[in-house]
Image: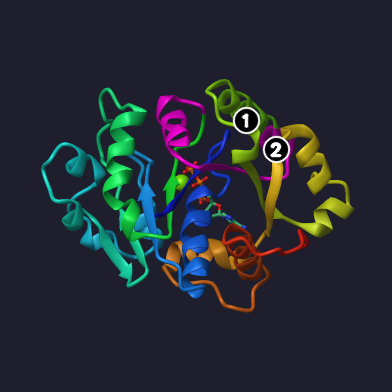
Amino acid sequence: MAKIFTVASGKGGVGKSTFCANIALSLEKLNKKVLLIDGDVCLRSLDLLLSVDEMVVYDWLDVLENRCDKDKARLFFSDNIQLLPAPSEYPENMTCELFGSLLSQYRDEYDYIFIDSPAGTGALPLCFAQCADTCLAVATPDEISARAACVLGNQLTAKGIKEENLRLIINRFDEKCVKKGKMLNADDMIDRTYIRLLGIIPEEPDLMCSSVTGKQLFDYSDAKTAFDNIAGRITGKEIPLIL
Ligand SMILES: Nc1ncnc2c1ncn2[C@@H]1O[C@H](COP(=O)(O)OP(=O)(O)OP(=O)(O)O)[C@@H](O)[C@H]1O
Ligand SMILES: [Mg+2]
């Protein structure tokens, strides 16, 4: 039965969708089967990041509202990575029970399900987080993103999500900037967000390119290693928290 993660952030544009696409690729290398659910209603992006945008016909709201079968809605990026695109209209009266009923239709077929959440602390991100086993808070190493991640963490714990089910991903980390005092380091981020760290992903210009060209990251990039390490930790391997 799939372990369900929601990938959230307080501040927008910090790399949630990039994380979802790349963590799926890393888990696939470990022979894990992954379903990505684009939760960014009206602003879907995972279909573009995975270059399956021309195949989108249905979305998960069509499944929930019985306009299409659960198998018809998912797009096959590969045998082990599938995508449920986001609807282009906001789902009325979304509840944790309703979204949970969608998850339960797919849960048995996958090792992991990742929900790419919209940014912020609105009803939808909170609903996704409540449906998940673990909530990953993505933040870039700056004061604004750190504060937003802290607010997100507080809102999630207020909704009953336990601290042990909340993890921090620091994205776009640049060692040189940290040394020059222009960027927060990992300890600063943990101190400000009060969230336990799961991994650090370095700044990687190729990630930006891959979102434009649809080409995957090169295996030798530091970012790829960072995603592989996080994938390893998710599968229960003991991998030290270094860059
Ligand atoms: N580690 C990284 N290094 C360099 N660029 C990155 C990195 N991670 C993400 N980016 C870039 O940052 C931009 C925003 O990324 P992305 O769309 O994944 O963020 P998001 O959190 O999903 O945004 P939104 O809140 O709008 O959904 C993209 O151009 C992406 O290529
Ligand atoms: Mg996104």
How far apart in space, not on screen, are marks 2 and 1 (Cα)?
7 Å
What residue is shown with label 1?
153
| 208 lies left or right of 84 | right
Q: Is residue 125 magenta?
A: yes
Left or right of 127 on screen, residue 187: right
- As drawn, is 190 to the left or to the right of 87? right
Q: Can you give x and y, in whole percent of width and height, for residue 132 in the image?
A: 46, 40
Among the 4 quarters of the image, the one containing residue 34:
bottom left
Instruction: For the C terminus, give its image quadrant.
Output: bottom right
Q: Residue at x 55, y 50 (%)?
A: 15
Question: Residues at badges 2 and 1 in contact (C-beta under 8 Å)?
Answer: yes
From the image, which quarter does the N terminus lie in? bottom left
Instruction: Look at mark 2 in the image and give the residue it sits on.
Output: 195
Which residues fall within the magenta stretch? 121-146
Whether 30 is drawn above or below 161: the answer is below
Quick check: 124 above or below 207? above
Question: Quadrant location of residue 53?
Answer: bottom left
Image mark for residue 174: none
Please tell me which residue lies in front, 86 or 23.
23
Residue in the image at 57% along x and 23% along y = 155
Q: Residue furthest left?
A: 67
Query: Looking at the picture, how far across and down is residue 81, in whole percent?
Result: 37, 65
Visible residue check, residue 139:
no
SS label for mark 2: loop
Residue shown at the point (56%, 28%) measured from the top left: 156
User: Image quadrant of residue 163?
Assistant: top right
Residue at the spot 18% in from the left edge and 50% down from the top edge = 58
Q: Nearer the viewer, residue 160 or 123?
A: 160
Question: Mark 2 is on which residue type?
Answer: Ile
